[in-house]
Amino acid sequence: MRAGVRIGIDPGDARIGVARSDPSGFLATPVETVRRGKGDLARIGRILAAEEDEGATVLEVVVGLPRSLSGREGPAAAKVREFAGRLAARVAPVPVRLVDERMTTVSAEAMLRDQGRTGGKRRAVVDQAAAVLILQHALDTERATGAAPGEIVEET
C-alpha cells in the first residue's frame, strides 16, 4: 500500500462531498461539503494545501464516477469527467483518479437514515458520507490488489 493521504471527492450538481484518508491509507473520514459553483475547485485546492501545510503528503485525489448498474456512462458521468479534468489541472502535480461509484449516494443515504438523520441534517452530510464510501472503496481495492484504483485523469 502506498503511503500518503488520499482525498475523496463525490461531485454532485449542487454540492461536492470531500473525504480524506489517514496517511497509511487505511481509513477514510469526512472533511466537508463544498458548494458546487464558482470557487469550488479553489476550495478543494485549499483543502489539499491545508493537508500539506500540516505535513501530510497528498498522494492523489479520488473522484467518484457515476455509472449505471450495467456499467454504462451517461450524462452524469460526462459531467464528472469534465469536472475531474478541471480539478486535475487545478491540483497538479497531485494526480486525480476516477473510480466507479455506483450506488454510493444511495448507500450513504441509507446509512444516514439508519443512524436517525433525517431531512436537512442528512442532506448536510450525505455528500461527505458518499465521498467517504468512494474513498474507502478505493483504499480497500488498492489494499486487495496492490494496484492504484481507477483511471488517471488528464488535465483539461
Image (spheres, helix red, strand yellow):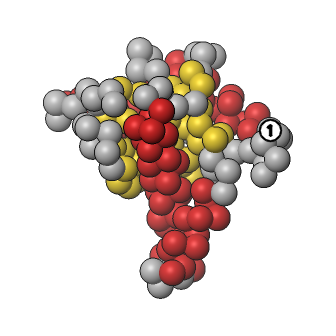
Is 3 positioned to the left or the right of 155 in the image?
left
Q: Nearer the viewer, residue 12 or 38?
A: 12
The residue at 55%/65% (across/down) is 108
The residue at 82%/40% (across/down) is 72
Q: Position of residue 21 (x, y in %)?
A: 33, 43
Vertical order, 95 against 23 (above or below): above
Is 26 positioned to the left or the right of 15 in the image?
left
- Which corner quadrant holds the C terminus? top right
The residue at 43%/29% (across/down) is 146
Mark 1: amino acid: Glu
- Residue at the outermost left position: 55
Vertical order, 33 against 144 (above or below): below
Q: Is residue 43 at least partly visible in the picture? A: no
Vertical order, 48 against 126 (above or below): above
Q: For the residue labelled by badge 1, is the local secondary structure a helix, a strand or a loop?
A: loop
- Which corner quadrant holds the N terminus? top left
Q: Is residue 57 at least partly visible in the picture? A: yes
Q: Quadrant of residue 81?
A: top right
**In this figure, which residue is indicated by the disc labeled 1?**
73
Count of numbered tags? 1
